[in-house]
Image: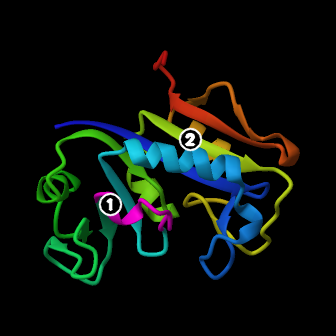
Amino acid sequence: MSLRFEGYVIVSADGMLADAGHVMPDSLKFDGDKLFFEQALDRAALIVHGRHSHEQQPNSPKRKRLVLTRRIRALTVDPELPNTTLWNPEHASFEEACVFADVTSGTVAIIGGPVVFDMFMDRYDTFWLSEAPRVRLAGGEGCFVGVPERTPHQVLAAHGMKPGAPFVLDAANDVTVTPWRPAGDSN
């Protein structure tokens, strides 16, 4: 297999990706970030996420995806979404799930939630961390396992990732995206 792993998340100033109900509130949605995210997912060969994460974009049904679930044992195609493979990592490896989904090369976009991000933490070629510093989600869901006890930056750094130069996605709201890559990577 020849796969490249990229993670994508936008977080509030306190490191949250969703409110306490596991829902991304409108206060964390910005046009520049949505465009960056949508274009990245359009290029991805496979999208991986948990049952609470979904990008809800016009091209979403066309994208191949793995949805992590503990509700099934064997890999299976979602009966309502033919491009979606339901995957229980306790019963099949990621590589087996990729073969089942007919994806053996290209970019794998990991879009959350926290447990899913954590599963791939030592595989990322790039983790795209978008930040909305003017938004706070007290009591929300941290973007990674261990947030808010640690910041998203501390979690990524603890896995040997280093930040690159941030890009501005929404100047009016100070929203940026920073590529985090393995420490030895010069990309």
Residue farthest along the front direction in this orientation: 58
- Point 58% across, 33% down: residue: 179
Q: Splitting the image into 4 quarters, where does residue 75 fall?
A: bottom left
56 lies left or right of 31 = left
Q: Residues within 10 Å of mark 1 (few under 14, many from 20)?
A: few
Kindly identify which residue carries mark 1.
Answer: 62
174 lies left or right of 53 = right
Q: Splitting the image into 4 quarters, where does residue 11 fall?
A: bottom right
Residue 7 inside the magenta-drawn segment: no
Q: Secondary structure at mark 1?
A: helix
Q: Is residue 54 placed above or below 12 in the rendered structure? A: below
In front here: 34 or 177? 34
Residue flagged by tag 2: what amino acid is it?
A: Trp
> Does residue 150 appear in this view?
no
Q: Splitting the image into 4 quarters, where does residue 19 fall?
A: bottom right
Q: Secondary structure at mark 2?
A: strand
Q: Tell me the number on the disc at residue 175.
A: none
Q: Is residue 114 placed above or below 19 in the rendered structure? A: above
Q: Is residue 131 placed above or below 93 in the rendered structure? A: above
Tell me residue 9's x, y (percent).
58, 52
First in sequence: mark 2 vs mark 1: 1
Query: Which image quarter holds the N terminus?
Result: top left
**Total number of numbered labels?**
2
- Point 61% across, 53% down: residue: 34
Kindly identify which residue carries mark 2.
Answer: 128
Tell me residue 121's x, y (percent).
44, 46
- Point 83% across, 43% down: residue: 174
Q: What is the magenta range?
A: 54-64
Magenta part mainly helix, strand or loop?
A: loop
Residue farthest along the top direction in this orientation: 186
Residue flagged by tag 1: what amino acid is it?
A: Lys
In front here: 49 or 62? 62
